[in-house]
Image: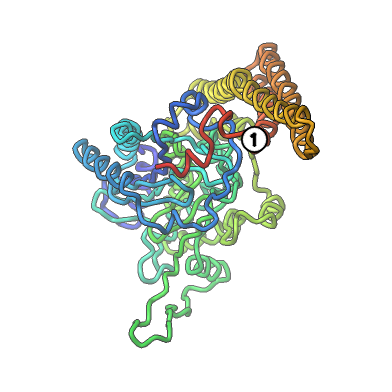
Amino acid sequence: MEAVSKQALRVLKKFGNTATRVVSNVGPEQEYFLVDEKNYSQRKDLILTGRPLFGAKPPKGQELEDHYFGSIKERVSAYMQELDEELWKLGVYAKTKHNEVAPAQHELAPIYSTANIATDHNQLTMEMMKKIARRHGLVCLLHEKPFAGVNGSGKHNNWSLSTNTGENLLKPGSNPIENKQFLLFLCAVIKAIDTYGDLLRVSVATAGNDHRLGANEAPPAIVSIFLGEQLTEVLDAIESGKTTLDSAAKFINTGVDAIPVISKDSTDRNRTSPFAFTGNKFEFRMGGSSQNIAGINIIINTIVADALSDFAEILEASDDLDTAVMTIVKDTIKNNKRIIFNGNNYSQEWAIEAKKRGLPNNKSTVEALGAFIEEKNVNLMIKHGVFSETEVHSRYEIMLEDYSKAINIEALTMLEMAKREIVPAAIGYTSEVLDGISVKKASGLPLKTKKEEALAVKLSDLTESLIEKVEALDTAVIGAKNESETLDTAKYYKEQVFTAMQNLRLVSDELETLVSADYWPFPTYSELLFNI
């Protein structure tokens, strides 16, 4: 925050702005799931890892979007009301609350605060969410992807810059093309994201978030900026040498006399974009729901500070402010416009186009974290006094170690559940099916048993496969001990252990669809998502 204020003031001084401080403001929208405490207590994976490691897809998910657009359930509403009241007592101004897309998923959003206060408030919010839930017989899940097959949970980091006099530096005004101060700060963000998109990806790199990014519910791992139709027109016009824009305001006419003509919002949100301009701020949508937003805002503030530093040097060396500003804006558009994308970030076409543009696509935490210790990024942190080289490398090592530990705990939990609960359940139900077949055959009556015999064979084959996959995961976990370097260990967990976990889950989830509910040892997705 100190770095971005220092560099922003250098720029503002050239505009005759008398501000003495620039503050980054943040409003973190917090998504979460609620499940019944009784169901939660019957699943070791939820207790130990925060997400179900096994679970077949339920017959109904979020296809109808009836949860998103439906009313809030009374039990959940009571929880939300008490949560608001307890947060207000702590000075956390929680304001917006609503259902989210997935069943049992919800969201809370606060009033904006400075980045420091917003970070503290969000930590308090997560703590209170978990604490208050228990009073209502519920458990709050903050994992980024608790349930496979439905949307995961993010933490949308709404970020802006303002002066101590209350001026929002990212407010376009009625005529953005003539608002040179706004254009300069907008271009600083564009340049920052293009130059340091790899660092922004690092800020959201966790084992939990790997499940969520790019899964058609959250932005992909490719970092880009959405500006919207109006601002894109403005920048295109400037690049082509225009100083005015003739585009008229757009309106929506429904054709119904009782409804007035409505002015169309030119900054409509693009929910597929990682970093979207939304009127007078940017919404960074890649953050995971369990994350501390300090890491995210350290990166955003520092990279924007660096771009402003470059701009300030040019402005301070020029006697003609208007010419210098327009030169900076044109050069930024020309050199950094590859980062701007207003289309569907979920599409395969964008992944291909992004590759052509040279934008990195680091899909996993292990791939992403290497950028943190690249020379340009280490030098950035040192230049602005944010981290020393030792601190950067320390954080890098800690993040890798955290990833490995998270996967290790999940793998060990899967092994315990599979060995002690799922395998016995599968064997027990198979035995019951075989006993039923034996009774029929012993009766001497001409009863058909071919379908039952086929079911028994399928159950037996799947159980055998399950045991094989358990042994494979066991071997993979043991093999991790052979890796001595932190990076090598993290790579091993990603490539060997996590792959073995996925293979085990596939077999178990298929078994779940065949084994009697009387035998299945823990609550299913249907019970977890819909029994509130």
Q: How many marks?
A: 1
Residue sitting at x 52%, y 66%: 232
Pick the front one: 136 or 281: 136
State the residue position of label 1.
Answer: 509
In this picture, residue 500 sits left or right of residue 323: right
As drawn, 202 above or below 268: above
When the figure is inspected, residue 107 is found, relative to residue 210, above or below; the finding is: below
Is 528 positioned to the left or the right of 495 in the image? Answer: left
Q: Residues within 10 Å of mark 1 (few under 14, many from 20)?
A: some
Report the quarter where the C terminus lies: top left
Residue 118, position in %: x, y? 32, 40
Left or right of 143? Residue 256 is left
The part of the image, by quadrant, that contains residue 500 is top right
Closer-to-camera residue (121/88): 88
The answer to whether any part of residue 404 appears in the image is no
**At 38% from the left edge and 47% from the top edge, which residue is drawn?**
107
Location of residue 456 in the rendering, given as x and y in whole percent from the top left corner: 75, 31
Pinpoint residue 19: horizontal percent, then vertical percent. 27, 50
